[in-house]
Image: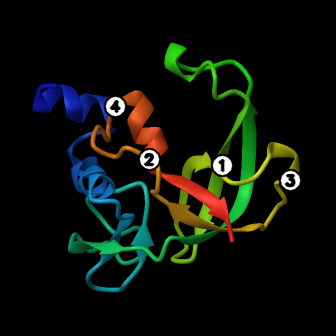
Amino acid sequence: MAQDEFVRRTGGEEWIPYWAAARARELRFQRCSDCGHWRHPPGPMCPDCRSFSSEWARASGRARLLSWVVVHAPVLPAWKDRVPYPVVLVECEEGVRTVGGLIGAAPEDLRMDMAVRLRYDGADASGCGDAGTAFRATRFSPI
């Protein structure tokens, strides 16, 4: 895939470090170099102090479950044998929220504020940014 196509499909150039970290099986978010505020989605300026100085810091991978939806109709033909599966919204320990898949629990076992952690095992992160593999790269499981 051409670089401009990758950028278009993955949220823009500001997301490139996020997907590069996912390929390396790391969860990284922007953190303001001046005030320390974590932010996601990425952007050019800190919403707290208005600084344009930031770094991509590694997150702990620990989070709590805020919300979820159970997918019953496969989004991609290759996923037809995976339904039903949950898509979760979590709040990471660092205060940022992100969306991902969930493994290791049945949809009926999910609870608000359930502690989860990031898991990369079994996920192919090599194609991060593509519709299918990007989603699988960020998965969580109950602690």
Compared with residue 72, is residue 117 higher up or lower down, i.e. above or below? below
Neighbour tally class for label 2: few under 14, some 14-19, many 20 plus, Cα within 10 Å: some
Disc 4 to disc 3, C-alpha distance: 29 Å
- Which mark, by number, is residue 123? 2
Question: Would you say the residues marked 1 and 4 are in contact, meaning their CB atoms lie under 8 Å apart?
Answer: no
Considering every residue shown, the one lying at the far top of the view is 77
Disc 3 to disc 2, C-alpha distance: 22 Å
Q: Position of residue 56 (x, y in %)?
A: 27, 69
Q: Which residue is mark 4?
A: 130
Q: Earlier in the sequence, mark 4 or mark 2?
A: 2
From the viewer's perspective, is 57 left or right of 77?
Answer: left
Q: Earlier in the sequence, mark 3 or mark 2?
A: 3
| Secondary structure found at label 3 | helix
From the viewer's perspective, is 46 left or right of 40?
Answer: left
Question: Would you say the residues marked 3 and 1 are in contact, meaning their CB atoms lie under 8 Å apart?
Answer: no
Neighbour tally class for label 4: few under 14, some 14-19, many 20 plus, Cα within 10 Å: some
Front tag of 3 and 2: 2
Compared with residue 112, is residue 2 higher up or lower down, i.e. above or below? above
- Which mark, by number, is residue 109? 3
Neighbour tally class for label 3: few under 14, some 14-19, many 20 plus, Cα within 10 Å: few
From the viewer's perspective, is 2 left or right of 99?
Answer: left
> Based on the displayed image, in which of its 4 quarters is residue 3 positioned?
top left
